[in-house]
Amino acid sequence: MNVILFGPPGAGKGTQAVFIVDNYGIPQVSTGDLLRAAIKEQLPLGLKAKSIMDAGGLVPDDVVMGIVEERLAQSDCTSGFVLDGFPRTIAQADALNQLLTKMGKRIDCVVSLEIANSEIVQRISGRRTCSACGKGYHIRNAPPQREGVCDACGGSLRQRDDDSEAAVQNRLSVYDEQTSPLKEYYRSIGILKVVDGSAAILDIQKQIGDILEGCKCDHP
Ligand code: AMP
C-alpha cells in the first residue's frame, strides 16, 4: 500500500506516520528527515538545502526528487511506503506520478490532516526533538520525564531551526500557496481522504486505520 500523509507543518504527520509504520509494516519516507540527515552528514545537497530550510522555504524540486527516487528504490519500499512531507508542489506530484509509473506502482490513498493555522503555531512552538536519536516531544502535550532530556536515549532535546516563529509563518504561507492546491489535485482523481487533525491522537489513528483498511480493499 502506497500512502501520502498530507497536511500543513505541525498537523501531526510525523506522529501519525509512526502509527502507520507500526501497524502496516511499511516505512515512513519523510523528505524533511532525509534532508536533515543530509545536513547532519554534511553532504553537498544538505549544505545547499540548509539555509532554505532554516528560512522555511522549499528546497528545489529536482533536489527533492533525487532523494525520493533513491529512497523509493530501496528494498524496504517494495511492498509499500508512507510519504510524509512529499509531494509539496504540483511539479513534485507530477514527477512522483512519472516515477511510480516507471516503477509499475501508484499512490493508493492520500490522507489529509486538516487543522487551523492558530493551532499549528501553538503546536510547533512546543515541539522538541532529541539531537541524538530524533525522538519527538512536545513540552505540553508529550513532555519528556526530565526537562530537556530524551527518555529513550538521554540525548539533549532541541528546537528545530525552522520552528522559530518567523520560519513557521513562512512555512504556512508556502503551504497555502504551493502545497494546498495538491488537495484538489488528489481529490479530482478520487483518492483524497480528509481527517480532522485537531482531534485526539487516538481518534485520528482510528480514522486513519479505517481509511487504510478501506484502501486495502479497494487496492488489494
Ligand atoms: P518537514 O520536516 O516536512 O516539515 O520539512 C522541513 C523542511 O524541509 C521544509 O520546510 C522544507 O524546507 C524542506 N522540505 C521537506 N520536504 C520538502 C519537499 N517535498 N519539497 C521541498 N522542500 C521540502
Image: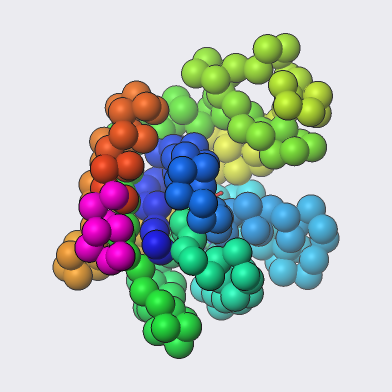
Q: Which quadrant holds the C terminus?
A: bottom left
Across and down, in percent, residue 134 comes to 69, 39
Which residue is outermost to the top? 146
Q: Is residue 219 magenta?
A: yes
Q: Residue at x 24, y 59 (%)?
A: 217
Q: Nearer the viewer, residue 44 or 84?
A: 84
Q: Is residue 8 magenta?
A: no
From this view, report whether residue 36 is shown above or below residue 197.
Answer: below
Across and down, in percent, residue 114 comes to 29, 41
Q: Is residue 63 visible?
A: no
From this view, report whether residue 64 is shown above or below residue 137.
Answer: below
Which residue is outermost to the bottom? 102
Q: Is residue 163 visible?
A: yes
The reply, left or right, for residue 10 in relation to residue 143 is: left
**Segment tinted magenta in the rendering:** 213-220
Q: Residue at x 29, y 49 (%)?
A: 213
Ligand 1 appears in which quadrant? Answer: bottom right
- Which of the 4 quarters of the picture holds residue 207? top left
Q: Nearer the viewer, residue 53 or 9?
A: 9
Q: Nearer the viewer, residue 105 or 13?
A: 105
From this view, report whether residue 43 is shown above or below residue 106.
Answer: above
